[in-house]
Image (spheres, grey):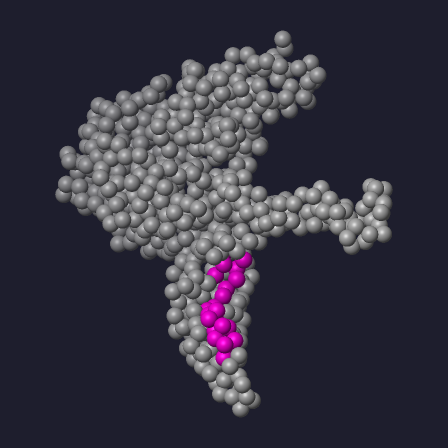
C-alpha cells in the first residue's frame, strides 16, 4: 500500500543491488567455487538458475525497503489512534396518538421504527434518543394586537372575560373577530397556553368554530397568515403544510362547500418546536402561539373583513422526538471470567455506536453483588484496583486489564542465572527471581474474579450512509405500542457516515499529533471538531477573525457527511441534506468545551449554500447520432455536472467545491467538453438558486459567474418544482 499524499521523506535503502548486479556477482564467483563450469552463455541451464535466484533475491530486497499495511496499523495503535466506527444518521420522528388523552402520556426512549423491507434492501431501523412526553394543554388567554412585535407589548384580551370555559376545555361565546375590522398586514392574535406537563415538540390540534355566513374574501388555498411559536429566542413557524389547516385560513371553505355550518368547527394541526418554554410577556405568563396576517404576495388576495369565531379548544395528539439510525440490544451475556489478566470477549453485533451513561458492562462475582465497570479509551492511567475495560467499536472486542512485564525483568533474570555456581544456590536464586518478578509486573486495570458472569447491559449498533433516508420513509413500528396510531419522519436522515478507512486515519494522524488533544490554533479546532463528530463531518473550516468578531469567539464552518448515491443517479445532493443537526452540534461543542482554553466560546454554523442550474445545448459526433447514444451522453453530462458542483466530491480535485470560490461559465464549458461524443457546445447559461427565508428560489435571469461569498459553497440538485435541475439539449448541426 502506497500513500502518495504523505510527505516524500528520504527512506533508507537497506540493499541497493539490482537484478543485473546480482546476476553479474554470481557469475564472477563461478571460477572460484566451481572452476570446471566454463560455459556462461545465456542458454546454459545454470545461468537460468542464477537468474531465477537473482530475481527472488531482488524481490526480497524490494520488500525490505517497504513497510507493510500491518505495520501502519501497529504504528497508529501505538499512537493511540483508532479507526472511527460508522456515524449514525439522525432525524426526527413524529408520533400520532389514536385519541387525545385526559392526562400526560410518555413514549419511552428506544422505541424502534424502520423503513419498509424490500426484496433488494433490508429495513433501516431508527430508535428514539430520549422519552417523548405528550402533555395536556389548556388555553389560558386569547389576545390580539394591531402590529406584530418580537416582544409583544400592546395586547388586548378578547374572550376569557366574555366567553365561558366548559369542563372539556372548550371556550365558547359570542362572535369575536381575530383581526382588526380593516385587516392589515401585521395584525395578529396570540394564544397563551398553560399546562402542568412539558409540551416541548408536541403536536397540537386547535379547533376553531366559525361564525355562519362570514366569508373573508381570501383564496382558501393561499391564505395570507402564518402560525408561529415562541421557542425562548425567536418566533418559529409551526404549520408544517397547508393541508394541516382545515379552516383554510379561517374561511371554512370546505365545510361551506359541503353544505355544513362553520360552527361545527375545523382543526388546525401545529407542530411545536423542540423547546417551548413558559415565558412572561407583559402581564401574561404561559407558552405562546400566534397567528400573523402576513404581507400579500403576487396574485394573492387578502382579507376584506376579519374572520369571526365563536368557539375555541385545544388538545395534544402526538409529538416529535429525535431519533438515530441504531438498534438497541439489551442484556447480552458475554461469558464467564477465567480470572486471567487481559481476557477478551466479543459482542454479537457490530459496529458499536458511541456509548451513553446507560450502556456499560455489569460484572457479577461468585456470591457477590453486581459491579458496574467503566469503559476507558486505554489502560494507560488505570490502576490495579480500577474497574476498567476497553471496547473496540469496530470489532466489538471487550478487553479487561492486562498484566505487563517490564523489559528489565528479563535482563535481571539473566544476570541472576549467570551467577548460579552451585546446585545449592539454585533454590535461593529462584526465590530472588520470583521476588523480582513481583516487583516488575504491573497490572493495568482490575481483572474480573474467576467465575464472574459478564454482561453488557445495553449497547446500540448501526450507523452508515444508508441511514440518510428520504422524507416519509420511516413509518413502521417494530412492535406495537399503546395509543400510538402512526409514526412518520418529516425530515430527511442526515449526518450518517461510513466507518473510517485506514487511508483516512493515516491522513489525520500527523494532525492529531500536532494538536495533542488541545484546541489552541485554528487547525486544532478543525482537527478536534472532526474527531468529535466520529466521522459525521466531511469538511470543517475555522473562520478567520474579523473586525465584527468578538474577542474569544471561535467560529467553525461545518459541512456534514451526506449520501452521494444521488449523484450517480442524476439527482445531485440537496443542501437540506447538509443540515447540521442539533444532536451533532451538541456532540461537537461538548467535545471542544473540554479541550479549549478558558474564556473561549465556540459557535458552529453552516456555509451559505448557493445552487447552480446549468442550461446549454450540445452537438454530438456523427457516430453517436442515435437515440440510445444521445440519451447516454445526456446522462453523463448531468452526472458530471452534479459531481463537479458538489461540496463533498466536487471541484477540479474531487475533494469538494472550494469554499468561497465562484463558478464561471468557462468552468462548465471545460467540464462538458471532456465528455466523449460531444462535438461542440452552444451558449452556456448559469442560473443561481438562493435561499430566501425558508424557501429556495431560482433566479429568472442567468449570470456570467455565480459567487457564493467568502463563506459560501456551490451545490446542485434536481427539483422539478424549483427547476433546479440541469437543462441540457442535444441539437443537430
Asked if residue 404 lies in the magenta stretch, the reply is yes
Range shown magenta: 391-416
Q: Position of residue 363 (x, y in %)?
A: 45, 72
Is residue 567 shown left or right of residue 386? right
> Is 430 included in the stretch rendered in magenta?
no
* Viewport quadrant of the C terminus: top right
Residue drawn at (59%, 49%) of the image: 14
Residue 645 drawn at (x, y percent): 48, 27
**Residue 163 visible in rendering:** no
Residue 22: x %, y % from top left: 71, 46
**Above-or-below relation of 313 to 213:** below
Where is residue 43 shown, x and y percent of the image? 85, 42
Residue sitting at x 42%, y 18%: 705
Is residue 507 in view from this perspective?
yes
Q: Residue at x 50, y 42 (%)?
A: 9
Classify the position of the N terminus by image quarter: top right
- What residue lies at 54% left-to-right and 71% top-to-bottom? 335
Which of the two residues, 227 or 353, is positioned nearer the viewer here? 353
Would you identify the image quadrant in which residue 707 lies?
A: top left
Amino acid at each position: 500500500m502506497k500513500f502518495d499524499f504523505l510527505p516524500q521523506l528520504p527512506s533508507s535503502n537497506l540493499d541497493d543491488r539490482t537484478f543485473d548486479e546480482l546476476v553479474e556477482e554470481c557469475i564472477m564467483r563461478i571460477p572460484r567455487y566451481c572452476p570446471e563450469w566454463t560455459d556462461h552463455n545465456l542458454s546454459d541451464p545454470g545461468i537460468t538458475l542464477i537468474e531465477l535466484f537473482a530475481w527472488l533475491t531482488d524481490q526480497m530486497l524490494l520488500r525490505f525497503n517497504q513497510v507493510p499495511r500491518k505495520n501502519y496499523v501497529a504504528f497508529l495503535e501505538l499512537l493511540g489512534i483508532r479507526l472511527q466506527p460508522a456515524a449514525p444518521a439522525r432525524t426526527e420522528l413524529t408520533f400520532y396518538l389514536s385519541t387525545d388523552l385526559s392526562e400526560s402520556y410518555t413514549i419511552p426512549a428506544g422505541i424502534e421504527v424502520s423503513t419498509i423491507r424490500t426484496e433488494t434492501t433490508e429495513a433501516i431501523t431508527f430508535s428514539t434518543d430520549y422519552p417523548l412526553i405528550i402533555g395536556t394543554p389548556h388555553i389560558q388567554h386569547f389576545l390580539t394586537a394591531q402590529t406584530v412585535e418580537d416582544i409583544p407589548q400592546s395586547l388586548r384580551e378578547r374572550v376569557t372575560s366574555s366567553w365561558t370555559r366548559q369542563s372539556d376545555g372548550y371556550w365558547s361565546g359570542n362572535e369575536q373577530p381575530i383581526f382588526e375590522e380593516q385587516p392589515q398586514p401585521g395584525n395578529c392574535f396570540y394564544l397563551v397556553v398553560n399546562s402542568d406537563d412539558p409540551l416541548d415538540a408536541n403536536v397540537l390540534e386547535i379547533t376553531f368554530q366559525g361564525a355562519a355566513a362570514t366569508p373573508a374574501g381570501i383564496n382558501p388555498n393561499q391564505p395570507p397568515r402564518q402560525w408561529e411559536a415562541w421557542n425562548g429566542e425567536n418566533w418559529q413557524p409551526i404549520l408544517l403544510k397547508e393541508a394541516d389547516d382545515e379552516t383554510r385560513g379561517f374561511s371554512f371553505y370546505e365545510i361551506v362547500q359541503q353544505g355544513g355550518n362553520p360552527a361545527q368547527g375545523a382543526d388546525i394541526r401545529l407542530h411545536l418546536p423542540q423547546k417551548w418554554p413558559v415565558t412572561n410577556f407583559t402581564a401574561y405568563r404561559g407558552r405562546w402561539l400566534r397567528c400573523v396576517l402576513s404581507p400579500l404576495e403576487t396574485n394573492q388576495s387578502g382579507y376584506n373583513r376579519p374572520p369571526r369565531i365563536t368557539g375555541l379548544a385545544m388538545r395534544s395528539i402526538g409529538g416529535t422526538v429525535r431519533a438515530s439510525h441504531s438498534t438497541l440490544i439489551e442484556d447480552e451475556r458475554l461469558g464467564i471470567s477465567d480470572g486471567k489478566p487481559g481476557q477478551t470477549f466479543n459482542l454479537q453485533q457490530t459496529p458499536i455506536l458511541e456509548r451513553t451513561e446507560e450502556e456499560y458492562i455489569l460484572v457479577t462475582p461468585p456470591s457477590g453483588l453486581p459491579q458496574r465497570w467503566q469503559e476507558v479509551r486505554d489502560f494507560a492511567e488505570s490502576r490495579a484496583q480500577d474497574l476498567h475495560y476497553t471496547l473496540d467499536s469496530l470489532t466489538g472486542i471487550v478487553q479487561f486489564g492486562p498484566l505487563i512485564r517490564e523489559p528489565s525483568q528479563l535482563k535481571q533474570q539473566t544476570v541472576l542465572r549467570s551467577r548460579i555456581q552451585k546446585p545449592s544456590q539454585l533454590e535461593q536464586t529462584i526465590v530472588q527471581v520470583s521476588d523480582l518478578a513481583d516487583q516488575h509486573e504491573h497490572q493495568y486495570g482490575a481483572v474480573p474474579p474467576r467465575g464472574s458472569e459478564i454482561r453488557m447491559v445495553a449497547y446500540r449498533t448501526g450507523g452508515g450512509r444508508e441511514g440518510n433516508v428520504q422524507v416519509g420513509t420511516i413509518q413502521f413500528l417494530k412492535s406495537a405500542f399503546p395509543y400510538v396510531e402512526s409514526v412518520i419522519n418529516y425530515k430527511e436522515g442526515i449526518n450518517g457516515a461510513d466507518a473510517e478507512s485506514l487511508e483516512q486515519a493515516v491522513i489525520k494522524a500527523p494532525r492529531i499529533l500536532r494538536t495533542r488533544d488541545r484546541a489552541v490554533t485554528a487547525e486544532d479546532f478543525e482537527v478536534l471538531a472532526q474527531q468529535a463528530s466520529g466521522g459525521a463531518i466531511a469538511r470543517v473550516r475555522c473562520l478567520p477573525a474579523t473586525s465584527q468578531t468578538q474577542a474569544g469567539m471561535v467560529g467553525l464552518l461545518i459541512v456534514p457527511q451526506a449520501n452521494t448515491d444521488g449523484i450517480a443517479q442524476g439527482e445531485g445532493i440537496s443542501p437540506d441534506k447538509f443540515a447540521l443537526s442539533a444532536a451533532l452540534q451538541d456532540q461537537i461543542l461538548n467535545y471542544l468545551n473540554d479541550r479549549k482554553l478558558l474564556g473561549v466560546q465556540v459557535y458552529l454554523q453552516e456555509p451559505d449554500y448557493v445552487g447552480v442550474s446549468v442550461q446549454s445545448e450540445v452537438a454530438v459526433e456523427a457516430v453517436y447520432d442515435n437515440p440510445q447514444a444521445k440519451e447516454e451522453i445526456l446522462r453523463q453530462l448531468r452526472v458530471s455536472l452534479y459531481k463537479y458542483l458538489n461540496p463533498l466530491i466536487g471541484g477540479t480535485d474531487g475533494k469538494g467545491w472550494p469554499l468561497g470560490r465562484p463558478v464561471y461559465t468557462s468552468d462548465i464549458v471545460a467540464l462538458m467538453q471532456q465528455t466523449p461524443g460531444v462535438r461542440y457546445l452552444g451558449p452556456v447559461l448559469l442560473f443561481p438558486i438562493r435561499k430566501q427565508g425558508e424557501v429556495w428560489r431560482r433566479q429568472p435571469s442567468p449570470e456570467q459567474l455565480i459567487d457564493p461569498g467568502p463563506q459560501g459553497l456551490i451545490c446542485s440538485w434536481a427539483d422539478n418544482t424549483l427547476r433546479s435541475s440541469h437543462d441540457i439539449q442535444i441539437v443537430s448541426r
